[in-house]
Image: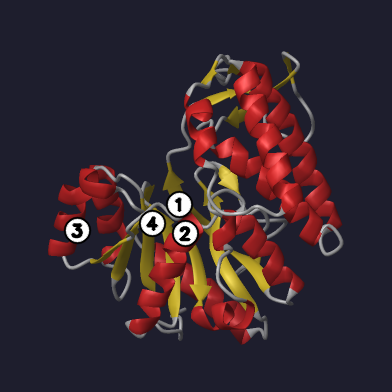
Amino acid sequence: MKPNLPAAWAVFSTFRPGSGAEEAVSSVAGQVDGVIVVDDGSGPVADDVLERLAASGVLVHRQSENSGIAAALNTGIRLAREQGAANVVTFDQDSLVPSGFVEALRVAQDAATADGVQVGVVVPEYFAAVRQARGEMSAYGPAANVIQSGMLLPLSVVDAIGELRADFFIDLVDTEFELRLRREGYAVLAAPGLRLGHALGTQYRRELFGRQVCLPGIPPEITLSTPFRYFYRVRNRIVLNGEYLRAAPKQIIRDTILDGIHFVNALWVARPRRALWRLYRAAINAAVRGRMGRMPEALQPIAARIRWNAPVFEREQT
């Protein structure tokens, strides 16, 4: 089955990219009409990589300052529109794209459109080891808790519901967009069997007050983020809950419970704990006062002091 839809442009956001970004771009370049890289204020440290990408034919746009992943992707989407794109596929700088990936997304999109489905986005069934689909799959299926890397997005959908939330800066940007799509009547879909490789970082045991959490449907491991991101994760979770609790109560309640366990776990293993607690308090205050965008500069040295004192998760060998 060949898709009838126009080919997509790939849009990458980068921040202080290494050679892995070149590998990521190369992995998808032959699958799309063109590739756009939006660098989010890396400065001179990224000169060599970005110059090599530009020399290879990639459209490189450099932001003058760090504005967040949503703003970077929005810029890339606008640039893709100027190039005549009808669809974009968004990627992180460390996502390795397998052969046939974009066509598989488009086949699922085409099949759903032919069935009269109002398609919002299409994602791979698996992001690394994380399944983004729900239930049984045929030519396509419903997705939930999607991650923006590897997401096929028609630009007509952006026209209808707006861009990614730039004021979220980072974290839960994709979740907010997913919830907005559903609220406006668009389907969030997954392409069956498709997997996007991605480095998830060091994984730690999921604990609550020092005891391992073993609950049905909840993985026994977590990936702790870079400490500064907990400001955004807490603030944006509060804002998201306030805006979408009525529209998606089951998803909001489940995700809030999981995030709550995660935040307690992170606080338990943070050193010094009081530094992470200060980030949490600042995030709550920012959410209550509606202060969005980038984390205040005064919090950055506090976040930089935090280290994780946590047991690395090791799967049992069978």
Q: CA distance from mark 1 to mark 4?
A: 16 Å
Q: Residues within 10 Å of mark 1 (few under 14, many from 20)?
A: some
Residue for point 18% across, 50% down: 47
Q: Alpha carbon of mark 4 to alpha carbon of mark 3: how far?
A: 13 Å
Compared to residue 37, the image places residue 224 above or below, namely above
Q: Which residue is mark 3?
A: 53
Q: Amino acid at mark 3?
A: Leu
Amino acid under label 1?
Leu
Residue 108 picture quarter:
bottom right
Is tag 2's residue or tag 4's residue first in the polypeptide sequence? 4
Q: Is residue 15 above or below residue 62?
A: above
Mark before the other along the chain sequence, 4 or 3: 4
Label 4, secondary structure: give it: strand
Pinpoint residue 24: horizontal percent, then vertical percent. Answer: 31, 52
Label whose residue precedes the other's in the sequence (3 or 2): 3
- The residue identified by callout 1 is 196
Which residue is at 76% across, 48% downward?
Answer: 288
- Distance from disc 3 to disc 1, alpha carbons, whole Å, reads 22 Å
Using the rendered image of the protein, determine whether residue 149 is visible from the camera's viewpoint. no
Q: Amino acid at mark 4?
A: Ser
Front residue of this view, candidates 264 and 4: 264
Whether the residues at callouts 1 and 2 have beta carbons within 8 Å, the answer is yes
Query: Circle 1 sits in a helix, a strand or a loop, which is it?
Result: strand
Residue linked to disc 4: 13
Q: CA distance from mark 2 to mark 4?
A: 12 Å
